[in-house]
Image (cartoon, grey):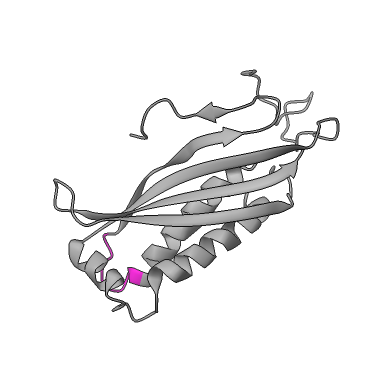
Amino acid sequence: MTDELTHFNQEGRARMVDVSGKKDTHREATATGTVYMKPETLKRIEEGQIAKGDVLAVAQVAGVMGAKKTPDLIPMCHPLLITSVDIQFEVIPTNAQGIAAIEIAGTAKTSGQTGVEMEAVTAVSVAALTIYDMCKAIDKGISFGKIGLLKKSGGKSGTYTRPEPLP
């Protein structure tokens, strides 16, 4: 794996990396993120008591849509033929500080010349933003954290697994 930055041309200006010479391989990436909220907010989500609807169902669809729109949001991302996006949620009722949370995991897959890491991270981020949007009327203090890549596979650089938990 190289530490060279590839998104700059000879003049030092931003460019989209040329992947035309790369082989198509199966590529997969999983990202994670956490949405923190009041325990009462989480209880209302679980009981279906949010006025805008089923928060996790809408966030799941939003995450998939976010993955598909990644090249429209991130200037140098390649448009990909994404073959799968899956969003999963784990509810954390209350931590030691009395804060509730929803952990989001997003996995994106493709067969192509470049990876789907950005699609997985975007899926998680958009799902988190959707949870906030649907609940902000009752909990403006909702926040996000621990957003990042957990693992990826495929391509020239092979497999990467985050060696330690996100801070």
Query: In screen coordinates, is 73 left or right of 149?
Result: right
- On whether residue 158 falls in the magenta region, the answer is no
Give the image location of residue 121, x and y in percent: 52, 46
Query: In screen coordinates, is 145 left or right of 107?
Result: left
Query: In screen coordinates, is 69 left or right of 148?
Result: right
Which quadrant of the structure image shows residue 132?
A: bottom left
Give the image location of residue 91, x and y in percent: 30, 57
Prevalent SS, magenta region: loop
Q: Which residue is at the front of the view, 97 or 88?
A: 88
Residue extending farthest to the front is: 26
The quarter of the picture where the N terminus appears is: top right
Range of the magenta residues?
135-141
Give the image location of residue 56, x and y in percent: 41, 67
Residue extending farthest to the bottom is: 51
> Residue at coordinates 50% horizontally, 58% vertically from top-left?
126
> Residue at coordinates 28% horizontally, 54% vertically from top-left?
101
> Residue at coordinates 68% horizontally, 51% vertically from top-left?
71
- On whether residue 140 falls in the magenta region, the answer is yes
Give the image location of residue 8, x and y in percent: 72, 29
Q: Is residue 58 above or below residue 3?
A: below
Q: Is residue 140 above or below residue 23?
A: below
The quarter of the picture where the C terminus appears is: top left
Q: Is residue 114 visible?
A: no
Q: Which residue is at the front of the view, 109 or 138?
A: 109
Q: Is residue 64 visible?
A: yes
Badge count: 0
> Residue at coordinates 40% horizontally, 47% vertically from top-left?
33
